[in-house]
Image: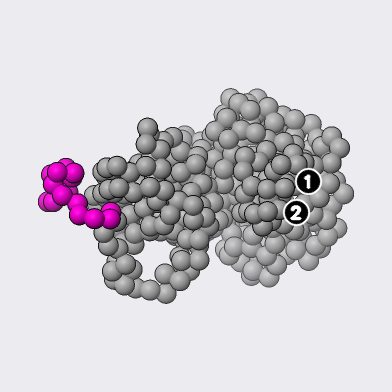
Amino acid sequence: MKINPVILSGGSGTRLWPLSREQYPKQLLSLMGERTMLQQTVSRLDGMEHVADSLLVCNEEHRFLVAEQLRALDKTPADIILEPVGRNTAPALTLAALALQKAAPDEALMLVMPADHVIQDVGEFHSVVKAGAILAERGRLVTFGIVPTAPETGYGYIKKGDANEVAAFVEKPDAETAGHYVRSGEYLWNSGMFMMLASVWLDELKRFHPAMFEACKAAYEQGRRDGDFYRVNAQAFGSCLSNSIDYAVMEETDRAAVVSLNAGWSDIGAWSSLWEASVRDGQGNVVQGDVYAYETQNALLISQHRFLAAVGLDNIIVVETPTPCWSCTRITRRTSKRWSTASSRKSAASIRRIVGYIAPGDITRALMPERAFR
């Protein structure tokens, strides 16, 4: 049975503000290497046998960016389904399942991947996907659980049962509870990646959320082709409740299964996560763009537009863009989303006034290259 990659690209990526914006979210950015996160995701199954073309679900405002990034890879998608409004992952997956079931009414095996994740060990990922496919073909709804490397409080957890059974889905814990989970060896991070038959997903959604199923079904059936894209009916889809795959089905079903994955995964859900997942220099720095670092260590320094200098700093994140500049300690996690919401109400001029000197003390010509003073 062929694997149908379903790539969900509807996220806004606000946790990586100011680089990631509503109109240009993180999955469309090149954060690690030359390829964008979307392009890395689309290419993740390259080399595997029995893999169909990817089906993408994205915000309609990003459609041309998504299509262009696929063309740059010389990849033709099975389809690009446009969401007129965000309704979280469960409705997005339902649209994909309806499309695949229409194209392959016998059975369609879906591998569901968010467009903004990083996986370092692609070979190991392929092996785990094959194991997940065996379970999914038997009618299980498979989730991939990440072997935890730290007591992370930003992820939900999955408690393992016997074999591939799920004992429990657990909400994001506090630091003490997360530490207990990791030490016990009984818990995995919830990755947000899944594998299942399209028919099984639709049957379970009808079972637990019939109104959501009917709204998505109406939206898809009343949709229309628009060149390379498929536009669902905006009114019907807008009436659908917002819900995630986990809450809508995975935490309710008795068909859930989990497969452990230890392949260098990250959702790059915070600037500190990008530092952790990136290749660092001898001082522990991750540097992108026109950056000068002196006596600086364990830093993430990104310059998009202007020359950026950091002197005598430790454990800091600085992200410079043509308008705002973001700076925080590296141990600060998952806070830029809150600031991005607040800053959306500020003018560009007021945001620019926030930007000041980054380095403590004087910056002199003895420490700086000549171009810093031009």
* Lateral position of residue 190 relative to residue 69, left or right: right
Q: Look at 50% across and 39% down and name the residue there.
A: 277
For the N terminus, the image quarter is: top right
In this view of the protein, which residue sits in the foreground, 313 or 30? 313
Location of mark 2 (residue): 170
* Lateral position of residue 271 relative to residue 91, left or right: left
Q: Determine the residue located farthest toward the front in the rendered image.
A: 361
Looking at the image, what colour scheme do you see? one colour
Residue 180 drawn in magenta: no
The span from disc 2 to disc 1 (Cα, nearest Å) is 7 Å
Q: Can residue 214 be seen by looking at this rendering?
A: no
* Between discs 2 and 1, the one toward the N terminus: 1
Residue 159: which disc? Answer: 1
* Lateral position of residue 79 relative to residue 277, left or right: right
Q: Amino acid at mark 2?
A: Val
Q: Position of residue 71 (x, y in %)?
A: 45, 40
Q: Look at 72% across and 36% down and name the residue there.
A: 260
In this view of the protein, which residue sits in the foreground, 306 or 215? 306
Q: How many marks?
A: 2
Disc 1 packing (10 Å; few <14; some 14–19; many ≥20): some
Q: Look at 68% across and 53% down and name the residue there.
A: 176
Disc 2 packing (10 Å; few <14; some 14–19; many ≥20): some
Q: Can residue 183 be seen by looking at this rendering?
A: yes
* Lateral position of residue 55 relative to residue 248, left or right: left
